[in-house]
Image (tube, rainbow, N blue to C red):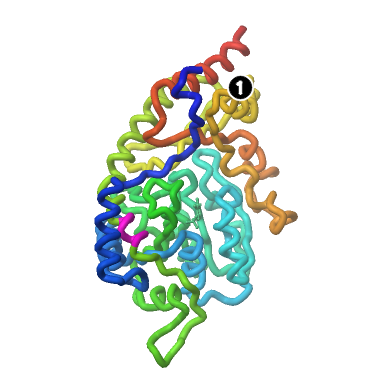
Amino acid sequence: MNNENLQPLYVSSPMLPNIDDVTSYIQEIWDSKYVTNNGPMNQKFEKKLEEVLNVPTALTFNNGTIALLVALKMFNLKPGSEIITTPMTFAATAHAISWNGFVPVFADVLEKDLTIDPKAVEKAITKNTSAILATHVYGSICDYEALEDIAQKYGLKLIFDAAHAFAAEINGRSVASLGDASIFSFHATKLFNTLEGGALTSPNLKDKEIVQLLRNFGIKNEEEVTHVGINGKINEVQAAIGLLNLEIFEEERAKRKELREKYSSFLNDLPGITMQPNPKEFKNSEQYFPVVIDKEKFGRSRDEIYEALKKENIFARKYFHPICTDFEPYKGYDIVSTCATPYVEKVKHEVLCLPFHSGVKNSHINIIKSIFIGCKSTIMN
Ligand SMILES: *Cc1c(COP(=O)(O)O)cnc(C)c1O
């Protein structure tokens, strides 16, 4: 190990704006004494977000989970109805369904990119189904055309958890414009962050005010409270950091794109290692770099690679293992699949997210490479 690698390397590292720029914005906020409640910074930030995400409505939140809660609340879905979602996602996706009093119904994922399988979704529909909540997991975009068809055919709302897909585009369409609504997370671990934060976007929202009401306790005016709202407001310092990070996230994304190429250059040739597809018509958010490790073909398991990296102070993550149906509150929930055994039950033991940010140096890449190649040569000997 050289000195550089004595520092632990994590799967993500927050993109932070220049501190002097932050200080000067904070001075402005202090002078105005307008520190929260949809102040001037937030209004400017939302306008910029709508431009960057190329969507008519982008409303900010104090985190992505509250944005998810509101996205599920805003359509007045039938109380207690079923919402079809993926088990291969962060806990917040399933929890937002339960927290609203709905019932999560889990559908299997596709082998090609681990997004929800539209055929499994269709199979999971019952007379109680009211919506689909699909995650663009690792930044891979769901088969949105198939999901839009299904939603239309059965009269369901289609909501995307786009926490991993900030500023992604597919076939020239912004990811924020898909379905009825999308949510984003601006948590420090996400490509674009406001330390904590989030947003709700919609391509066709007739009544933007409903979201504004729901994120502010349902307070319409001094005399009236019209909705069961929550406190989803971002503060002015978060909004300022958002404005500054909007200036630099493309630079970070470009560095990660290069890193993707470097990783791919040696992983491509290894039997039993699969990477996410990254087709030409897709502008990747560059949020995560997952690999699927097939022990039979590769010779070593995901957990062995994970441990070998850890010995070098490199902390890859087994996202999203455990899957939602392994969590205490969802144990015993079925996973609807078109296969005899859901694919997700197999792949959860095989997927590993490698460190993926501009802090990953060539020396790190060499260590990671030697671990993967080394593992390969042991089976070839
Ligand atoms: C990060 C994340 C969230 C939650 O976002 P927070 O801003 O941390 O509340 C929701 N869904 C997915 C898929 C995420 O990765």
Q: Residue at x 50, y 74 (%)?
A: 230
Q: Which residue is at the far top? A: 381
Asked if the stretch drawn in magenta spans residue 238, the answer is: yes
Q: Which residue is at the far bottom? A: 223
- Of residues 237 and 196, the one drawn nearer to the viewer in this rendering: 237
Q: Residue at x 49, y 32 (%)?
A: 9
Image quadrant occupied by the C terminus = top right
Q: Which segment is the magenta one?
A: 237-242
Asked if the stretch drawn in magenta spans residue 284, the answer is: no
Mark 1 is on which residue type? Lys
Along the horizontal axis of the image, is 238 left or right of 113? left
- Of residues 141 and 19, the one drawn nearer to the viewer in this rendering: 19
Q: Is residue 221 above or below residue 137?
A: below
- Residue 139, by quadrant, is top left
Q: Is residue 130 above or below residue 310?
A: below
What secondary structure is found at the residue carrying circle 1?
helix
Prevalent SS, magenta region: helix
Q: Give residue 24's position: percent from left, percent from top.
A: 25, 56
Q: Give residue 329's position: percent from left, percent from top.
A: 70, 58
Q: Residue at x 62, y 62 (%)?
A: 104
Along the horizontal axis of the image, is 228 left or right of 304? left
Circle 1 crowding by C-alpha within 10 Å: few under 14, some 14–19, many from 20: some
- Of residues 229 and 325, the one drawn nearer to the viewer in this rendering: 229
Q: Is residue 99 above or below residue 370?
A: below
Residue 50 visible to an observer of this rendering: no
From the image, tell me which residue sits under label 1: 297
Along the horizontal axis of the image, is 250 left or right of 348? left
